[in-house]
Amino acid sequence: MHAGRIKDIFLKEIAVEFRQKYALGGIVLFTSALVYLIYKVFNNLTGLEWSVMLWVITLFAGLQATVKSFMQERKETYFYYYTIFDPNDLLLAKWLYNFVMIVLLFGLTLLFMSIFMGMPVKDYMLFAKGSMLGLAGLSTVFTFVSLIAASEHSSSTLMSVLAIPLVLPIMLLMLKITTVSARLIQDTSVDQDILLLVGINAIFLGSIFLLFPVLWRA
Amino acid sequence: MTNKSSILINGIWWKASGIIIFLYVLIGGMLVPLGPGVTAITPSNAVAGDTVVLEISGYNTHFTDAQNCNAWLKLDSNHLIKAYSIRSLSQKKLKAAFVLPDSFPSVAQVYTLSLVLDNEFDGVFIQPAALFVSAKTVISDALSGEWKNNFDIVFHERQGIFFPYRSILNETIRNTFFHVALWFAMFILLLIGVVYAIKYLRKGNYDDDIISSSFTAVAVMYGVLGILTGSVWAKFTWNTFWTNDVKLNMTAVALLIYLAYFVLRGMHQDQDRRAKFSAGFSIFAFTALIPLVFVIPRLTDSLHPGNGGNPALGGEDLDNTLRMFFYPSIIALTIMGLWMSQLMIRAMRIKDNILTR
């Protein structure tokens, strides 16, 4: 692990992203169009529908944004990385980058949704805490799955097939935390859900750090 | 490059023993009778001081054959009321008359009494919460009036082997040998699959990938069978094929993850990369399975034993007669799973030999 290298790769990812502005713009447009579509379809959302929609949009926008994390560069570039980087550095930088991307998309979705459909969340602290943990979990799963899917032609299909069942427990917990923070249901054991989210994140992160050095050689 | 691991166990003895054990479970599990139980009691409530005649419908009982039928209403182990007259209408119908005392030994609005039945054919059996009695007056002096303690009562013991009668479960208690045992066997097979996936990632021996994927395939088949047997069981006990129960839904997610594993395997053309990525994914899927199946259902409410405060396997749910078939069933299903995986391993090795020649 080398903090300087992680920072370098992270900055490089951002530079690459901003060089191809159409990709970034595409995802932003995708998100805002989806929010607007949902707004016009429902017209009036209840708090529960709002929470469900927030997480479904975040899930699909996140999938779109992270599917290419191991596909943007040519094969030769990866051979070059392989010779100079510790795989864990690369993984951590990619994970961090995906996390930042997903958080930005989530913030954007939240902004659009609160403009069009209001903001039912009452307990902001709980919502922020739960969301950050959940998004960290999403970015872990997406980073791992995009690595597995990267070698295939129809990778975005494969990515959704592989990622959606894996993120389901995280999504369910997130939905519960969101509904609790919107005071739609009373739950005194919400701290237990937060702990569970931390536990799932730890398991997922631990296993991808163990698996990545072996897998990315392929 | 591909060294054959010695996972294949030669000989017919273990396959034969698997089949024999499974036949034992199938025949014994289906033929051993259920113990006696009570299906209905009318009336279900009374007022203290009344004389009540309870009409009791039994299941697998021998009321007419028995000479010494006895019935008690029980508040706790120190407070019982004996029936003053008992008349059996048929093998499964019994009328028992009780004089309820005016006074009860503790303070409550309503007392819940259990019914204890005893005869020399069926032995002693208990129906909890059989009669609700509304109180009149309360005294603290125990053993006055009609109350007796049970220290001098000699109960009969039923002879022979039988499965415990549980209300709601009834005869479907036999599904324990198939539904629950399938999940146990599935986990054993999945564990072997994951061990070989790790082995593949460490050594890169292609044969380990064949073994890992075969075990996972058979385990997933067991998982599907486990869901099907559970679904049928749910229809008879919870009156629906599928409920909103966490354990069901988390298991469905786990199966989706494993079906995605086969999609992943099917999509890759290149043998080496397919092996590497599917091994990685199966390890990840197994780690995802642990919170899904073992942690989340235990924290939330579930209808399954062992979840949401319900007692786990063991205690009253799994008595020694059930154990006589439950553990052999796990062993037999595991052996048959090993056998099926071996057939798959052999077939895939032959295919691999032809392709790489």
Image: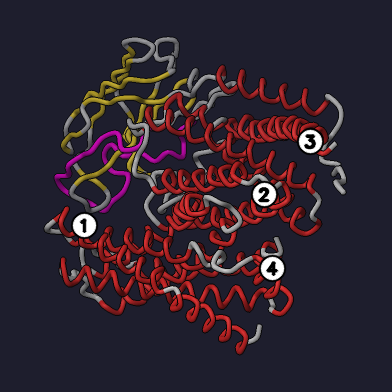
Which stretch is magenta?
B127-154
Image quarter where the C terminus of chain A lies is bottom right
Predominant SS of the magenta segment? loop
Amino acid at the residue labelled 1: Leu
**Residue A116 x %, y %:** 16, 67
Three-letter amino acid code of the residue under disc 2: Arg
At label 4, the amino acid type is: Pro
Q: Are marks 3 and 4 in contact (CB under 8 Å)?
A: no
User: What coloring was used for the rendering?
Assistant: secondary structure
How much space separates mark 4 and mark 1, taking CA atoms? 42 Å
CB within 8 Å, label 3 to label 1: no
> Of helix, strand and loop, which one carries label 2?
helix
Q: Quadrant of residue B56?
A: top left
Residue labelled with disc 2: B274
Give the total number of marks visible in the rendering. Answer: 4
The residue tagged 3 is B355
Q: Is residue B192 visible?
A: no
User: Is disc 2 on the same chain as disc 3?
Assistant: yes
Residue linked to disc 1: A37
Can residue A104 be found in the magenta stretch?
A: no
Task: Judge whether residue B309 can be spotted in this image.
Answer: yes
Q: Chain of mark 4?
A: A
Residue at the (57%, 81%) spot, across then down = A9
How far is the residue under mark 3 from the one under mark 1?
Answer: 51 Å
Same chain letter for marks 2 and 4: no
Q: Chain of mark 2?
A: B
The numbered mark at residue A213 is 4
